[in-house]
Image (cartoon, grey):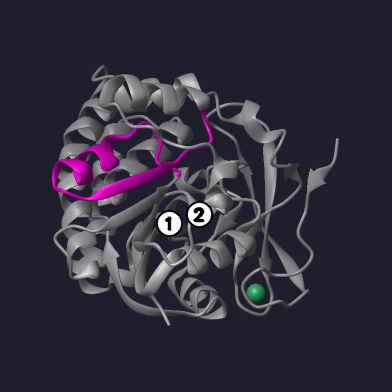
Amino acid sequence: MDKFNVHVCPVCNANNFSPFLTCTDFFVSNEKFKIKQCSNCGFKITENIEDEKNIGHYYQSEKYISHSNTTKGLVNSVYHRVRKYMLKRKRRLVEKSATLQNGKLLDVGTGTGFFLNEMREYGWQVTGIEKSDDARKFAKTEFNLENLPTEELFKLKENEYDVISLWHVLEHIHQINENMDTFSRLLKKDGKLIIAVPNHNSYDAKHYKQFWAAYDVPRHIWHFAPSQMKQFGEKHGFKLLGLHTMPFDSFYVSMLSEKYKKSSLSLFKGIFYGGISWITSLFDKAKCSSVIYVFEKN
Ligand SMILES: [Zn+2]
């Protein structure tokens, strides 16, 4: 089977890399994966992963879906409440960024449909792209959303959307440059591209190192910091309008990282270090555990 390896940095096109970290897939396989970093821009890349066709078994969609829908366990219960708050926050961010109360939204990697359902309830015309059959079925049953499989993305109408959003999705996409070009084509002039990804420059990433839950190898192929995301957007003709924080990610990721470390009092430690990460991000958005980037198509 062919493995997916990158020899040219997708952000800056340099071809020199150095080893960065070796991380374990704590979520599914317990296999180890190396992450390398671009010597020029510092962008980080998971090495030697399965290609697009074969990476599916590292996802265990059942686990992903139950994780998004069960209230069992404290971590999941917190996640559940936070999701409700975050849906509202995401909607307001979309409305504010687009300077529209409703418009056309394309959500890529839309998952089980909670976000699109929220947007549709507030008058947006929504289109969702989702790779997982199970997640699409869930969205259909639960919300009557007709989300489309990945290959449909490239057949959508050009210059059509006011906003394209990717909530923790870009880091999973193999053909990252091709996808960015597609987003640019599909957006209207001055359309907004909203991308949320984990931030390896965050306090919690530096604290947890190889245990940082948001490295999430091999599912996360790409690891961005704000300077690299800005450069990557510009490469595809986007202007970075601003950064926004995802404060709850500091706590969620820290608690999960403590669990991966198998530390005693993991919940309390997770809240403690998550708290430091959150406070740090109040002073510097570029230090938040996850960052939302708002770009405008030039
Ligand atoms: Zn680079």
**Left or right: residue 96 compared with residue 59:** left
Q: Residue at x 43, y 72 (%)?
A: 226
Pick the residue in front: 132 or 35. 132
What is the magenta range? Answer: 109-132
In percent of width and height, residue 244 lies at 27, 66
Q: Is residue 228 above or below residue 119?
A: below
Look at the numbered disc 2 and say if its residue's Cβ is closer than 8 Å to ligand 1.
Answer: no
Q: x, y percentage for residue 205? A: 44, 56
Which of the 4 image quadrants contains residue 147?
Answer: top left
Left or right position of 99 against 223: left
Height in image: 116 above or below 89? above
Q: Magenta span has 117? A: yes
Q: Is 223 left or right of 277, judged from the image as shown?
A: right
At which x and y percent is residue 293?
36, 67
Q: Quadrant of the N terminus?
A: top right
Disc tally is 2
Q: In percent of the image, x 21 and y 43: which residue is there?
A: 120
Q: CA distance from mark 2 to mark 1?
A: 7 Å
For the residues bearing labels 2 and 1, Cβ distance under 8 angstroms: yes
Point out which mark residue 3 bears.
Answer: none
Q: Residue furthest front?
A: 157
Q: Is residue 72 left or right of residue 224?
A: left
Camera-side residue: 35 or 164?
Answer: 164
The residue that mark 1 highlights is 197
Q: Secondary structure at mark 1?
A: strand
34 in relation to 110, above or below: below
Q: Is residue 209 visible?
A: no
Circle 2 sits on which residue?
Answer: 170
- Amino acid type, callout 2: Leu
